[in-house]
Amino acid sequence: MVRIILLLMLVFKTSLVFAQPSDAKVKSDAVGNGGGIISFKFTKSTGTRQWNSSTGNWEYVRGVQVKRKSDYPGINMIVDEDVVYQYVGNGGYSFWKVRVLSNSYEGIPNPAAKEIDDFISKDWQRFYGFYYGTIVKLWQQPALAENPEWVWHSINSVEFRMNIKFDHIISGRGVETQEAIWKVRLYRDDPKAPWKNMLALRSEEAADIKVVGFKNYTPQQLDDFEKQTLQYTMAEQKARQSAAALPQVNVPAFTNAEDITKYVHDVLRNGNPEKLRAVFLQLFAPGFFEDGSKVQLRAVEEQNLAQVITAVYQNKATYHQMYCQNPGYRVEQWGNGSGKKTIYITGAVNNCNSSFTIAPVNMGYKEGLAQTALKIVEYGVHVRQDAAAIDFINSFSNRKNLCKQD
């Protein structure tokens, strides 16, 4: 009886071996009709039987490397891939798919680390995505993974892996230190052209993410970390560089709102975009800026200023045309002895007025005493662009007939 059982076991084992696809079968499934194939080889002498938890089935995997001609003369594509078979019962396997592990090209090297660094650093926001607004510390600059797993999706698009270690805010909880893999894909229009676009995402595979530390903070403490994020610090750095490039303007220490308005009016009428921005950065109240910054305007304020600059200097009609050098002013005093005033500037044509609201603003403390200064807390600049207004202004042969006080 024992001999019969042993014989059955040997037969069963032998049937499994012979049920595995032959070398010829694997090669046929890997290369298809064989078009463009230059060479083929197995990466190992035998295959591997392994459990696929996703499909809930056993599979037989055979590693191969195939060299194919590309669409570009003199450039060949080398593909490392697994030819995968699913178990179908009775010791048999059926071809399922070819799983590409990596692509490379003969004649086109993988991009060098410096080439990658130079390109991704042009747009950190695109590279970090969501984490751009949560990362508060980079332990190291992004670097190619030990095994980048190069995959050329096409001759003009390559994918690879990068290592990053960083601290990032977990909302309402604290700051986590994480080591993770970023999957990066670069795009270009031609093999000889520079890279022009990228897609970068943190890998969501559990094996690619490692939490190495966590520190609890209160919500109030976490608020301070907002000014340490990549988004804030890089925007602040850019704003400082932009501010440093502006012309040096020594704005007087004004003691009344009327003089501030007259000064700004002169810049609007006779200045330029760079001078106006330099003046506004000094005269805007802190509420115009991101918390903790004196140069980084809030997004909505940056947009407003850009629109004002266009209206004042760069549109069909300019502020210089629509306002006299010595216009009429109307002052509106706010109540409660606040020292707050709104001053209206009358244009040279009807329905073309601008306004500035100016008030004493707390700029900080010294020995416990508030240090106040007059600042612009609200403003509106209007320059008519309609044909009627432009025709009216241009109808005067002598500007002094329009602006009698100039």
Image (cartoon, helix red, strand yellow):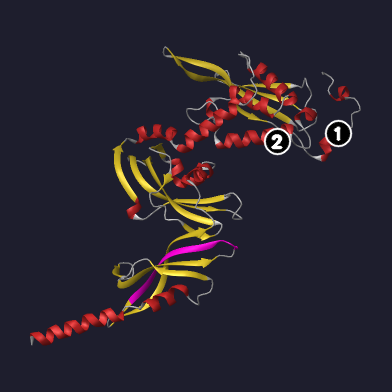
Label 2 sits on what residue type? Thr
Residue 296 place in picture, x, y as percent: 54, 30
User: Between residues 370 and 251, which one lies in front from this camera angle?
Assistant: 251
The residue lying toward the viewer, choosing from 338 and 58, is 58
Q: Residue tagged by mark 2?
A: 310
Front label number (1 vs 2):
2
Q: Which residues are magenta?
A: 72-86
Front residue (pair 58, 327): 58
For mark 2, does the 10 Å Cα neighbourhood hold few (<14), some (14 to 19), or many (20 or more) residues?
A: some
Inspect this view and state whether residue 334 appears. no
The answer to if 323 sits in the magenta stretch is no
Indicate the amino acid at tag 1.
Phe
**SS at mark 1?**
helix
Give the residue drawn at x 75%, y 24%.
270
- Is 66 rendered above or below residue 208? below
Outermost residue, right side: 397
Residue 193, how many percent across, how many down?
61, 51
The residue pinned by badge 1 equals: 392
In the rendering, at what x and y percent does residue 109 appear? 51, 53
Which secondary structure dominates the residues rendered in magenta?
A: strand
